[in-house]
Structure formats: structure tokens, C-alpha cells
Image (tube, grey):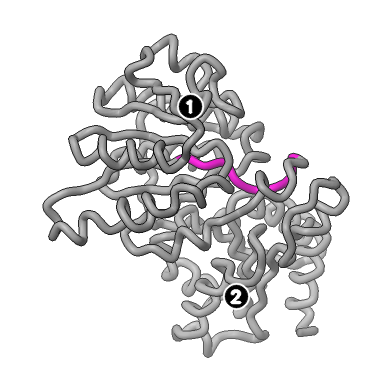
Amino acid sequence: MPEMTYLEAIRQALWQEMKRDERVFLLGEDIGVYGGAFGLTHGMLDEFGPERVRETPISEATIVATAVGASLLGMRPVAEIMFMDFVLLALDQIANQAAKMRFMFGGRTSVPIVVRMPGGSGTGAASQHSQSLESILMHFPGLKVVNPSTPYDAKGLMLASIRDPNPVCFVEHKVLYKTKGEVPEDDYMIPIGVAEVKRAGRDITVVANNIMVMKTLHIAERLAQDGIEVEVIDPRTLLPLDTETIINSVTKTGRLLVVHEACQTGGWAGEVIASVVGSPAFDYLDTPVRRLGGRDIPIPYNRGLEKFAIPQDADIEAEIRMMVAGKV
């Protein structure tokens, strides 16, 4: 398989789907001539023209509202929110309109939109351009929240999201854009709502998303040299959440740590932990379950303080070693 970056994998998915289905179009701020804030839609305007790569005003509410309206008329829009932080300006359109329309109209309509949003810290973009807001979006029934960590997953999940009849919030991590991996050039889909065991292990289950999956896998390789085998699970989709895969893993390892970049209070780790504690896996736990999230502070601009605000490799490794040693 050819190797490509996370960013290129998403672009290829958009490109292939726009070639395949004339109903698919893009809309967002600076996605045309400029090619998007991160260059992801570079070249799309030349290929598909301004009717299908639509520049919008600086209004997230307008972007999503337009996408919702177009979807009700049979189109399949992919809307870009330049930074995930700005999705709060479109929350009414996402949560009160897109998420609820199918239910409120008795299933007689659907809202097949994808709202792309780069999130996360690590670029020195400060408090209003660095947040991880996945947990907020998980609170609204009717939405799907997709959060890939690898180029392979990014392409397969994007294709699945565009073809899904429901509104999908597609969360991308900015730091992952340059990471590389093998990605088939052919059309393939990864089912929404299915987690993946990224690394098998026997001593502890670590559930992590996006950039934290990469960090945990790196640490797991190092810990294996000391005889500690970490099982790493990537939910890939946070809503719906594949609790079965997680519960089966914890039943085997007897330990659970959940790691995410988002602020710890109110983070999605709580949903994972509740699903395990309320399941038969509870009887197999050898230690209390733990969560490791970002500090409950706005993301600082200063690079040193930015790193302090979110879990780093040393923090994850320390938690794993402490739990495996039974010191919690």
C-alpha cells in the first residue's frame, strides 16, 4: 500500500467521493483558493469548481445551517469548521437542528452532513484555537462523533461518514496531519461505531483517542522491554461508543486507564469508565480504574505551559507503571 499523511488520506477520501457522487460538495471558510487553513482542500477548487467547493462568510452558524438545508434537499455536504473551538458558534444548528430532525419528522427525512473540525493542542495556537470538545458533541442523540488517529482510519471513516444518512462530526487532530501510514488507494470504509485494538496486551487496558493513541503506543513499546504488556484500544468513534470491545479487554487485563487530551472534568473517559464499572468486567478488576485527562485550565499559548496542560508521555507511563504495580 502507498504511504501518505493523515491530511492526504482525508483529502483523498473527499476527492474520491466527490468524483463518485455528484451530490457531495464542500463548504467553509478559505477552502477554495487558499486551500483551507491547513491546506487540506488544496487543488479541490481547480478540480471541482466553485459550485462544489464553496467559499463561505466567516459565520460557522451559516456554514452548518446551509449544510443542513442542502442535505434536506438531497445533497451530501461536507462542512469545514476551521478550528474545532468555533463549532460552539454553530451548536444550535448541529444540536437542535441536524441531530433532531430525523426524530422530529418521524424518520421521513435524514440529514447526511459531515462537519469536519480540526481540534487539539500542540501548535501554540492558544486557548481559543486548541480545545478538544468531543465530549460536548457526544451529549446530543442523533449525532455521530468520529475521531480517527491514523491515516488509514481517517480515510476509511471519512468515506463511511459521507455515506452515512446521519449527521457526523468528524474530529481531526491538527498535530496528526503530518503523520504517515499505509493507506489503500482503493475505496474502503471503516464501520462507524467499531473500536480497534491497536496493540494487544495482557497487563492493562489503555483506551485513548487521536494523538493520545500515538503517545500510548510509543510508551507501550518501551514498557514491553520491562515485561509490561499494554493493550491499547482506539474507540475511533466516540458516539456511538463500542463498549463491548473495551469491556472484553478489561475482563482479560483486569486494569483500565483512559487517556484523553480534553479537560478531565466532564471528559468522555467518564463514559468509558461507567460502561466498565456497570458491566461484568467489574468483577475482574484488580485495581481501581483511572483516567488521565487534560488539566482543567484553558490551553496556554506558552509552549512549555501548553505541554503542562495536557498529558505527556511521562505522565501516561507513570500511570501505567503505578497501576500495574498495584500502587493505586
Numbered mark located on residue 253 in the image: 2
Would residue 173 be visible to someone looking at this image? yes
Horizontal side of residue 317 vs 1, given as left or right: right
Q: Label 1, on which residue?
A: 11
| Residue 272 painted magenta | no
Q: Residue at x 67, y 85 (%)?
A: 287
Q: In the image, residue 282 lies at what x, y percent? A: 52, 86
State if disc 2 and disc 1 touch (CB < 8 Å): no
Going from N to C along the chain, the mark reached first, 1 or 2, is 1
Quarter of the picture containing the C terminus is bottom right
Instruction: Report crowding for label 1: few under 14, some 14 to 19, many 20 or more residues within 10 A (C-alpha).
Output: many
Horizontal side of residue 33 vs 261, given as left or right: left
Task: Name the residue nearer the viewer: 146 or 104.
Answer: 104
Would residue 2 be visible to someone looking at this image? no
- Magenta segment: 116-123
Q: Looking at the image, which residue sits at the far top?
A: 46
Q: Amino acid at mark 1?
A: Arg
Query: Under tag 1, what secondary structure?
Result: helix
Instruction: Report crowding for label 2: few under 14, some 14 to 19, many 20 or more residues within 10 A (C-alpha).
Output: many
Q: Residue at x 71, y 63 (%)?
A: 294
